[in-house]
Image (cartoon, coloured by chain):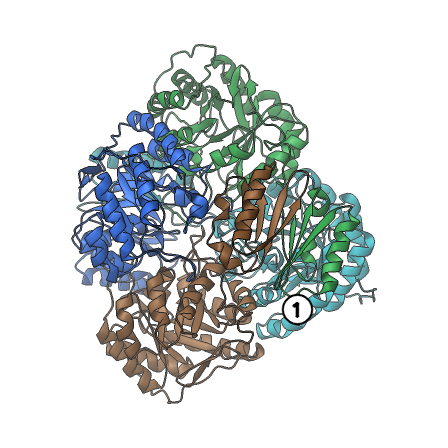
Chain colours: A brown, B blue, C green, D cyan
Amino acid sequence: MIIVLKPHATPEIVEHVLERIEALGLSPHLSQGVSCTIIGVIGDEDKLQVQPLQAIPGVEKVVPILKPFKLASREFHAEDSVFTIKGIKVGGGHLAVIAGPCAIESEDQLFEVAARVSRAGANILRGGAFKPRTSPYSFQGMGVEGLRLLKSAGEQFGMPVVTEVMDPRQVEVVERYADILQIGARNMQNFDLLKECGRTRIPVLLKRGLSATVKDTLMSAEYVLSEGNRQVILCERGIRTFEDSTRNTLDLSVIPNIQGQSHLPIIADPSHATGRPDLIPAMARAAIAAGADGIHIEVHGCPEKALSDGPQALVPDQFDRLMDEIRPLAELMGRTIDTCKKEATACAPC
Amino acid sequence: MIIVLKPHATPEIVEHVLERIEALGLSPHLSQGVSCTIIGVIGDEDKLQVQPLQAIPGVEKVVPILKPFKLASREFHAEDSVFTIKGIKVGGGHLAVIAGPCAIESEDQLFEVAARVSRAGANILRGGAFKPRTSPYSFQGMGVEGLRLLKSAGEQFGMPVVTEVMDPRQVEVVERYADILQIGARNMQNFDLLKECGRTRIPVLLKRGLSATVKDTLMSAEYVLSEGNRQVILCERGIRTFEDSTRNTLDLSVIPNIQGQSHLPIIADPSHATGRPDLIPAMARAAIAAGADGIHIEVHGCPEKALSDGPQALVPDQFDRLMDEIRPLAELMGRTIDTCKKEATACAPC
Amino acid sequence: MIIVLKPHATPEIVEHVLERIEALGLSPHLSQGVSCTIIGVIGDEDKLQVQPLQAIPGVEKVVPILKPFKLASREFHAEDSVFTIKGIKVGGGHLAVIAGPCAIESEDQLFEVAARVSRAGANILRGGAFKPRTSPYSFQGMGVEGLRLLKSAGEQFGMPVVTEVMDPRQVEVVERYADILQIGARNMQNFDLLKECGRTRIPVLLKRGLSATVKDTLMSAEYVLSEGNRQVILCERGIRTFEDSTRNTLDLSVIPNIQGQSHLPIIADPSHATGRPDLIPAMARAAIAAGADGIHIEVHGCPEKALSDGPQALVPDQFDRLMDEIRPLAELMGRTIDTCKKEATACAPC
Amino acid sequence: MIIVLKPHATPEIVEHVLERIEALGLSPHLSQGVSCTIIGVIGDEDKLQVQPLQAIPGVEKVVPILKPFKLASREFHAEDSVFTIKGIKVGGGHLAVIAGPCAIESEDQLFEVAARVSRAGANILRGGAFKPRTSPYSFQGMGVEGLRLLKSAGEQFGMPVVTEVMDPRQVEVVERYADILQIGARNMQNFDLLKECGRTRIPVLLKRGLSATVKDTLMSAEYVLSEGNRQVILCERGIRTFEDSTRNTLDLSVIPNIQGQSHLPIIADPSHATGRPDLIPAMARAAIAAGADGIHIEVHGCPEKALSDGPQALVPDQFDRLMDEIRPLAELMGRTIDTCKKEATACAPC
């Protein structure tokens, strides 16, 4: 930690800061110049974090040096984390292809999409049972009945399933049906939900918040990790910017950025980020070329009849073409796409 | 709702869209030009919202006309909402002055600050018992013990008290001790928490999320209102921008913007927005001049020893001066600052 | 300047950085801890700025301490700068009220608005002759003919006049007619234009760019100042954010923020920032309460017939009411509104 | 164009709007519902744009339908534009690989880098002679002497050269030495510069502004095109967001987004966008996978001694590796990388 004092700081202020540092058992290094004084503190930065040195009059700014996250860092765990979920590996060269409808609407709708995405090569099935909707008057999801359908579809097609959990009180029931718990972008800093998911022993798919920095995102992962659950998959799903021709702005630089400092897998969700089927394939390709550990794509048999986020879904035929584009790219990037064990059965077209 | 078709839309597409609208019992108005076709739909827009017309191939864009919120709108309730909380009015010309420490740290700390802010003219006491911290290793609040201290301080100084609730499971206990439930910026779209607070019958102080639009914010209020709780106070606390010399950017235009379309009171929190005591007084004044229904200010006896967000707190003497600045401004703006009934007793300096 | 080395930096890297600093005649201070090494450099930071130390492998980050601007800083000039422009003072307690149409469209239009704003109490007249339009097909301004009208209106109503200059080649002609040169937000980092305006001897009204930080803005002022022109008036006119119900987001915290570090006057332009007449008065009041040294308001006799930015203009009657609101507020804030010498003559209504 | 009236608009207002539209020779279509009235106007939207209908009291909002740019649109020119610059094709499946130092510092520095990037496979050489620097005290470029060196290096290595022009007065001299004129992000809305470059007959590399939307960017291109120069290459170089661990945020979705509506080639500049050599290769790959028509990479022999933007430059060895990664990816994407004719000669290592 570096403490920069205001120009012309009095000796009393310097003394006051030094005393405070020493009282914590730390050793300050004082550097004084003509117009500026800085104090370096090498040691256990945690001790200092709880002391808001910045509030001392005479202190210009405090610059932390160490990263605030630990369990999420490469310093703690140098190798890429790889999680095996019902036989499907994620991370460390294994590419997750998560696909399925935004919301589970009916058995027919879900199974039809599951059959198609499974046949096309997706290896994890997604579907929302509890839906975070900006309007209280919108469809809020099928709830537990949706969870049951999802589990059943996962079993039929041999795919692990992921679904969103929005409330700490739902964690227990969702864990009973799902293989991966999703925490949505709007809940990325719902700390009680993070902790509750951290107490389960199944992987957590944590989406970056719409205005979360890389550091914020890793700190939220740290909440889950620090409760004992070491299986966190991060997901970039777009941030809010001034650009108004897309739903959000997919920030792909976070992929190598996070991979450089954390061992956790990170995937990209071009469906939510762009909200536009015409941009999803290009952004899925870009994510893989950027080194993403997976992609998350919404697919719906008839988007114009979807109860949630229809306009951003690919239809199964578009998803087929996307997979055809992605396979050689994944190979070029040295990525394996694990395949589900059960053969997907045929299904009627939309 | 206006549906703009892509240039050169075929008659089949036009027909398809018209049929879908008519199937909902609505009447479409077709306008066709040389290069462009638009379809206007006048009627119950809710029926259409669930139909993602935008997903129909051939549709360029869908422009909603009606506002998506109802109970929060001035169309539903034309007059300013005024809430009376333990004798203190908020809204409709009554200025809330909410002050207190970021986190409740001890009885001494809380009572000392409460005494000072009460004496200076604050009329609602704030203090965090459950703290949303970006790091799991930071102080997480005193919990229920903190709630007890807050209630007791409120009684001693005759002030209603407000504290944050982060988890739907905490709503019941927080409601027992607090007069106002605060929903923090990071939880603004924690829809289950919104609903749970909507089921209580005490006012909810809802903070705008860091990247929430005005519409998003009013939709979150709608969640609370639609559960039956009609007492929502909105709070602007800064949004995330690229400016890096302040913690966030206080967007004061939301005050007249929201007041124009909603009857709910809206206050401003310059403490969280700026994170800088040197900017807080100017921003508090600006908020009042913009027509805010209140301000929210963090005050700490010794910011440099605060367990949470110390650097952004005013010391009691600064708060005294702020109140001296604010009183004539509030008067000029035609605002009354209700005063608490009990006389604040003297307290020892920091 | 503080140089933070990467964890486990080798002695060779430490040595390499130290040598580079000493080669510049500066003295490094080395602080080494278990996991981290920092090097403080006290002295002439300018010498180091040209050396991109951050590019040295093994360097984690470089933290500058000194501010990069000099002539714009309070360290260089402690007192508020006050400029006297044709008898009207700006800064140091004198409030500039700049008003007029977005674009000069005709003699009648300009003189009518000038008469009304002058009578209402505006003390500087604005009007665009060269218009920066996002579309090449939009009205681009009346050019030199507009400048002539503006000068003539200024003389008739005894008001100094301000108009935008967009091209370094126009500076000479604009300087002949105008009392203040405006540099628009889109040109804030048009460095050649800044330099050219810096070579004149009339004040420059420099608008903050749509995504410029406070530091960027002061650095652009520094460009003008460093050419010898010490009369720069800064202007906050809104930044681009994700909020889509206003044109931009007025960031009023920059007012006390800049006043704390710079002696230059800073005014606010709620017309461009909000783009909405219903929000302009509240934001003008807020700006004054925040301590702004002036406001910039667009006024048009018939906004629905304006050739540029009509929707954001106030009509003269609205401007009259705004001035009535602002006068007592300015007085409360200890601000004087200098008045123009000539009596405004009556004019026909729109 | 669609005009939405405010709820309960009076018949007088409706009449007033209809008259105004008809006065322009256009035909309005009126749709009236219980709570809402909309007026559709099909026809020449340009006529209406100059009429700020939004300023009419009683008008809620005006929604344009047609795109405001013409020459830049696919409607005007359906096929991809392909430009041939000294034998190197850009666009339509031909990938531009633009590389070179941020600033030209000396003959040795430039030729050394040119030799290396040419040998590695770059096909266009870049180098700044006039540098836009945020500080007036920073190195401002070598000027015309730099241009001469650049032209000479281009000839020696058989590469077309691109360099930035910042001032309309420089266009003539820059055009004499360069094969492509670059307009930097900070000048994207310097409309006089755009026009001046539009009057030349050499290609313009137009960088997206730091807070420019896709529409803004295409409108700036339209300025160049409307002056008669039909050779504009767009460049995404990062936008400003709240993320503080990278210089800017590379928004790759603009690549398919712009390609969908415009025939102009668009390239990506991961060097300026990220400012971090550790992220540049991944973002260059992602850009190509997203379908970019080229990449723009800064390379410097000794970044730690660079006079401008050193920390973001790749060293020649890193650029070699990047090209090795990019070649198979370009092939997979069906992109050709045109090669320069002259054999690059050997050069001494840094």
Q: Position of residue D120 (x, y in %)?
A: 73, 68
Q: How many labels sit on residues?
A: 1
Question: Which residue in the rendered view is the most extreme toward the bottom?
Answer: A342
Q: Position of residue A195 (x, y in %)?
A: 35, 67
Looking at the picture, does residue B345 appear above or below residue D104? above
Q: Position of residue A22 (x, y in %)?
A: 55, 52
Q: Which of the 4 quarters of the picture holds residue A165?
A: bottom left
Relative to the observer, which residue lies in front, A19 or D334? A19
Reading the image, the residue beneath label 1 is D322
* Quadrant of the snapshot with the C terminus of chain C: top left
Relative to the observer, which residue lies in front, B259 or C272? B259
Label 1: how many Cα within 10 Å (few below 14, some 14–19, many 20+): some
Q: Position of residue B165 (x, y in %)?
A: 28, 55
Relative to the observer, which residue lies in front, C56 or D120? C56
**Which secondary structure, mark 1?**
helix
Looking at the picture, does residue D19 appear above or below residue A87? above
For badge 1, the amino acid type reads Leu
Q: Is residue B243 visible?
A: no
Report the chain holding disc 1: D
Q: Is residue D289 visible?
A: yes
Left or right? Give the position of C113 relative to B197.
Answer: right
